[in-house]
Image (tube, rainbow, N blue to C red):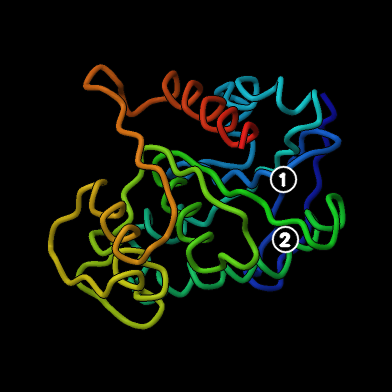
Amino acid sequence: MERRTTAWFSPNLQMEMPLVAYGHAGQPLLMLPTAAADYLEYERFYLVDSIKPFIEHGKIRAYSINSVNRWSLLNKQMPPRIKAELLTRYDRYIVNEVLPLIRNDAGGDARPITTGASLGAFLAANEYFKHPDLFRGTIPMSGSYDIRSFLDGYYDDNVYFNNPVDYLSNLNDDFYLKTQLSDILTSKGIPHTLDLWGPDVNHDWPWWRKMLPYVLGKTSQG
């Protein structure tokens, strides 16, 4: 399996941002890390190994990047206004810096699928729903899609436009269930699949290593 790493100073984030790429051909897959993890997390926890057959057969070329969660949503010392602003700047980093790199590899009209687990599921879904013209789809696993609990009641445009349950439906509820996002998408006529796994399934790596290849297999068949 071909593997390449690179890094550059991001003008949008004002920090060094690394990237790892796997594969030589196929549908681009952009992987967003969980919690405050880094771009190599999915390799360390064998999620990349779980999709290795897709990569080696040229069906998928995967890219994994850092998030800004450790400075943004998960940083209790960071003012909420800056947390939300960092999410907007992170979106610009992906669109203006990461996407051109992917398209340089995969073709100028390439539309990656985004994916991630846990807090990475939020990042993956948010990126796709904000830019459905730039991304083909999203595979968020075990995520929640309302960031208000991280922001101590603070709210501005950066919060609104990075909070899928708000900008997709203008919700103002205090609760959120995973099925609620599906209801929102259905009401907007957005094609999607809600796949609820059983009560024996945990919010952890062994199941994410099953989920991602399972969904990629169904995607490649379509």
Q: Nearer the viewer, residue 205 or 12?
A: 205
Which disc is residue 99 wearing?
A: 2
- 95 above or below 29? below
Q: Are marks 2 and 1 in contact (CB under 8 Å)?
A: no
Left/right of residue 112 with respect to residue 179 in the rendered view: right
Q: Quadrant of residue 47?
A: top right
| Cα separation between marks 2 and 1 | 10 Å
Quarter holding the C terminus is top right
Residue 103 spot, x, y in % from top left = 81, 57
Q: Secondary structure at mark 1?
A: strand
Callout 1 environment at 10 Å: few (<14), some (14 to 19), or many (20+)? many
Q: Residue at x 70, y 43 (%)?
A: 63
User: For mark 1, what is the residue?
Assistant: 28
Looking at marks 2 and 1 on the same chain, the residue that comes earlier in the sequence is marked by 1
What is the three-letter code of the residue carrying label 1? Pro
Quarter holding the N terminus is top right
Q: Residue at x 30, y 23 (%)?
A: 202
Q: Secondary structure at mark 2?
A: helix
What is the three-letter code of the residue carrying label 2? Leu
Callout 2 environment at 10 Å: few (<14), some (14 to 19), or many (20+)? many
Residue 155 spot, x, y in % from top left = 27, 78
* Front: mark 2 or 1: 1
